[in-house]
Amino acid sequence: MINWDDARFFLALARRGSLRQAGLELGVDQATVGRRITLLEQQLGAKLFIRTPRHYRPSPLGEALLPQAEAMAQAALTMMRTASLGELEGELCIATTDTLAQGFVLPAFTLLRQRHPGIRLKLLTAVSVSDIPNQEADLAIRSVRPEQGDLVVKRLATIKMGLYASPDYLARRGTPRSGQALQEHDLLLFPRELVARHWLSLCGEPLHEPNVVLQSNAQLVLMAAARQGLGIALLSTFLAEEDPALVRLLPDQHDPIDIWMVLHPDVQKTGRMRALVAALEEVFQPLQQTQPSAPPLSNTQGLSGYAPHTGHFLRNEPC
């Protein structure tokens, strides 16, 4: 019979596809992973993986055992979370973007640490898929609403994005005017495959074959490039307005972006998660007061204003 300790090694290798990556997930070296998988295969009398020089792929038996291993992982996680419902200490993992981390998550964590110093935070800021259903993060704050998975979701706020450039750039190239704003200017944008709509229109200004001189999937890089005088960038106003080296262009025009908070149903009732959610909502509250109220969501999970939804986060995030 496979126990949970065996199953977690099997599951990690099936998910990651390599001994090294599975070892990183489990916190052990790759030799340990290989040894545990070999022992498990000897116990079962059959191969669980098809090995290639670069990849481990589940065998037909491995594929058949994956659902049971996933169920064991879910059961183990539920037991751990149930045991810590009232705890106000321990680690929480948040997946977000660099700009949202800087503008909101870190201020919220400062409040949280003042109130509950036993809570620790792991912050993942890569712009990539964060799989909440598989517990790669406890909570995510993103500018894309999820589409798959049994999750709990709430819109935290709607933020504004505006156009910014440096005084040096404007002195050399002139200040854009509405209606003919951007056709003759150098633009700094997210790659088209990430946010295609920004290549068609920026803050209501239509674009036709825009002169994009720099692309980056990190908004802080675009902000630094605008500061260097490389062109005009679409930036979050909550960050760019604080930068004295940038000038807001067409200040009456902006692009609205919804910010979503998403968490796994199993973690929402823990004491430390409730404390984190309260701190996040407190930090986002000023934006909620200046924006139209969010549409009501049904409340079936126990947190006011939340509703179950489905979701993996996508890569096309402008914030």
Image (cartoon, rainbow, N blue to C red):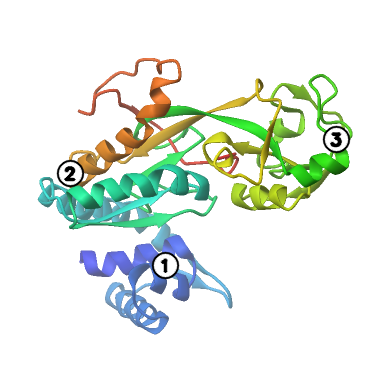
Residue at numbered disc 3: 174
- The mark that comes first in sequence, 2 or 3, is 3
Q: Is residue 47 visible?
A: no
Question: Is 58 situated left or right of 107 in this image?
Answer: right
For badge 3, the amino acid type reads: Gly
Q: Which numbered circle lies on residue 13?
A: 1
Quadrant housing the N terminus: bottom left
Residue at numbered disc 2: 270
> Which of the 4 image quadrants contains residue 76?
bottom left
What's the distance in space between the residues labelled 2 and 1, CA to CA?
29 Å
Indicate the position of residue 77 as horizontal and vertical percent values. Answer: 22, 53
Question: Is 20 situated left or right of 90 in this image?
Answer: right
> Which of the 4 image quadrants contains residue 282?
top left
What's the distance in space between the residues labelled 3 and 1, CA to CA?
56 Å
Task: Answer above or below: position of 142 versus 304.
Answer: below
For badge 1, the amino acid type reads: Leu
For badge 2, the amino acid type reads: Thr
Q: Which of label 3 and label 1 is nearer to you? A: 3
Q: Identify which residue is drawn at 30% across, 50% down.
A: 110
Q: Is residue 311 visible?
A: yes
